[in-house]
Amino acid sequence: MAIRIRAPSLSAMKHITYAEKSLLLGDEAADTLIEYAAVLASHGRGDGITLRALSSDGDEVDATFLLTAGAPLMADTATTRLPAPDNAEAVALMRSRIDRWERPEAVSAGETHPGSVADEDHFRFE
């Protein structure tokens, strides 16, 4: 009787290159990070976001990205047997901020538009 050993499944991940450093993120987190950076740049804004990533050593790390119009950020595909770090909360936060910029609601008197000086939440680093 032959024993079959199942190889770990491959994870779809992306290398994110930022400031001459490359980290691995899950596809959804990497794609959302790039989309969020593009939205911020198109509105002349910046923000900081912290994501769980895998370093070049394979260690799980917290990586904080400063997203501005001039920040060079690149994603390329990678395949690994390591599981993608959990970034569900950070992805949800970026998606909500993208939605605020891309689909702003009408602002009534006394309210602020996302990204205005009075919108302190937008400028707080996470």
Image (cartoon, rainbow, N blue to C red):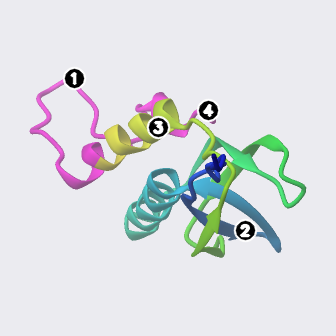
Amino acid type of disc 3? His
> In front of the other: label 1 or label 2?
2
Which residue corresponds to the image point at 52% horizontal and 58% vertical from the top-left? 30
- Determine which residue is flagged by label 1: 110
Q: Are marks 3 and 2 in contact (CB under 8 Å)?
A: no
Q: How far from the left and from the top, in percent, is residue 41?
A: 46, 67
How far is disc 3 from disc 1 in space, using C-alphas? 17 Å
Q: Are marks 1 and 4 in contact (CB under 8 Å)?
A: no
> In front of the other: label 4 or label 2?
2
Instruction: Give the number of the disc on residue 126.
Output: 4
Which residue corresponds to the image point at 43% horizontal and 55% vertical from the top-left? 32
Which residue corresponds to the image point at 39% horizontal and 35% vertical from the top-left? 92
Question: Magenta segment range?
Answer: 99-126
Amino acid type of disc 1? Gly
Say which quadrant the C terminus sits in. top right
Q: Quadrant of residue 79?
A: bottom right
For the view shown, which residue lies furthest in the top direction? 110
How far is disc 3 from disc 2 in space, using C-alphas? 22 Å
